[in-house]
Amino acid sequence: MATIRDVAKLAGVSVATVSAVINKDSGVKVSDKLTRRVEEAIKELNYKPNRIARSLSKNENYTIGYVVPSITNFFFPQLAKAVEDIAFERDYGVYLCNTDGRKERARYYLDSLIENRVAGIITTLTWEIEETDFIGNVLAQNIPVVGLAGARNSDRIDTVRPDDQEGARLAVDYLLARGYNRIAFIGVKESQTTVIRQEGYRQALLEAGLEYNEDLVGLARGFDNSEICGIVARIIDTCPDLRAIFVFNDLMGIAVIDALYRLGKNIPGDIAVMGFDDSIAAYTFPRMTTISIPKVEMASIAMERLFKRINGDDSSPLDIKIRPKLVEGDTT
C-alpha cells in the first residue's frame, strides 16, 4: 500500500506539501502546478489517506458508532438506515456494531469505538450495555452518547424512546373497541420492553373493567416458531373463546400468524392479531395491524441530541418519549 512519503517522492515535493493538498481546509496554500503533480502521483499510486490518523492529528473524527442488540430484528436495521441517512447528510460515516445480545461483543465494540476515537455513539440501552458499563466507560473518554429505542433510560445521557406502555394501551383499546374482549398477550422472557408493553396491556384491560388473566399471557425464550406455536396452542386450550392476540413485536407476530394457521384458525374471523413496531407488518399475509414506532422521527431527535453534545452542549440529559401510532391492517 502506497504511503504519503511515496506520493511525495513521486511528485518531487515534501510530505508537508502532499498533506496540504490532501487536507484542503488546512489553510496552507499550494500552487496549482504542485497541486496537479501531487494529484497525479496520488492517482498513479492509488494512494488512500489514513483517515483515522488524519482524525487523530486534527482531533476530529467524522464517524459515529451505532450499537444495536440485533440485526435480525428488522426494527433495528430500519433505525440504522435512518441514523446513517442523517449522518451522511452531515458528512459523517457510521460504524454499525451488532452486540447480538452478548456481553463479550459489547465489550469488544466498546474498546473498538474508543480506540477509533469516534465523534459520538448512538446505542440501545439493552442489558449487555448495562452489564459492561458501556455508558460509563465511553463518557470517561469524553465521547458523547445518546440512547435510542429500547425500554431503558439513563440519568447520565439523553435517551429517545417509544412510549411502549402508551402504545400497548392503544393496541388493547383498539381491540376492545372492535369487540375483541378476550385478548391474550405474547412476548419474550427477560425483556424489559416486554415487561413495559405487558403492563400497558394489563392496565388497559383493568381500566375497561376486564379481568387480567395470567393464563392469557405467554412468554417465549426467543423467536422460535415451534415454541411460539406451542404457546399459542396452550392459550387457546386454556381459553377456547379467545378472540385476539396482542404480540410483543411484528417479528413475533409473524410466528403467531403461522401458528394460528397451523391450528386451523381464520384471521381475523376466529382470532385477530395485533403487532407492535411496524417493522414488517406491511409484508405479512394478511397484512398485520400494528402499533407503529416513528423510527425516522426518533432517529432524527437522537442524532440532533448527539450532534449538540459533540458541539459541546453540556445541559442536563433529556429522556424523550415518542408516542406510537396505530396502523390498521387486515388481521383485526
Image: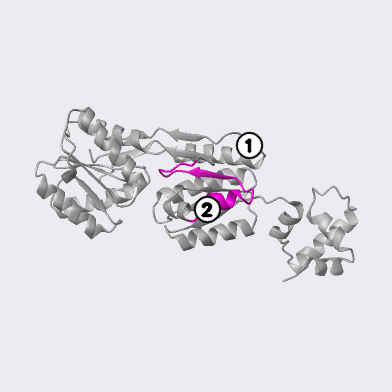
> Which circle marks residue 279 in the picture?
none
Q: Please state, as top left, top right, bottom left or bottom right, where the N terminus lies in the image.
A: bottom right
Give 133 or 19, whichever is nearer the viewer: 133
The residue shown at (33%, 52%) is 190
Rounded to the nearest angstrom, the CA distance separating label 1 from label 2 is: 20 Å
At label 2, counting other C-alpha atoms closer than 10 Å, the crowd grade (few under 14, some 14-19, many 20 or more) is some
Q: Along the horizontal axis of the image, is 232 left or right of 154?
A: left
Give 27 or 155, whichever is nearer the viewer: 155
Q: Amino acid at mark 1?
A: Asp
The residue shown at (54%, 59%) is 109
Q: Please state, as top left, top right, bottom left or bottom right, where the C terminus lies in the image.
A: top left
| Residue 42 location (% of width, % of height) | 78, 64
**Residue that carries the numbered disc 1 in the rendered image:** 314
| Residue 314 location (% of width, % of height) | 63, 36
> Which circle marks residue 134 in the picture?
2
Q: Which residues are magenta?
A: 132-154
Q: Along the horizontal axis of the image, is 130 left or right of 37?
A: left
The residue shown at (80%, 60%) is 39
Q: Is residue 244 above or below residue 112?
A: above
Quadrant of res 180: top left
In magenta stretch: residue 134? yes
Quadrant of res 3: bottom right
Coloring basis for residues: one colour
Q: Amino acid at mark 2?
A: Phe
Q: Is residue 208 above or below residue 135?
A: above
| Residue 168 location (% of width, % of height) | 31, 36
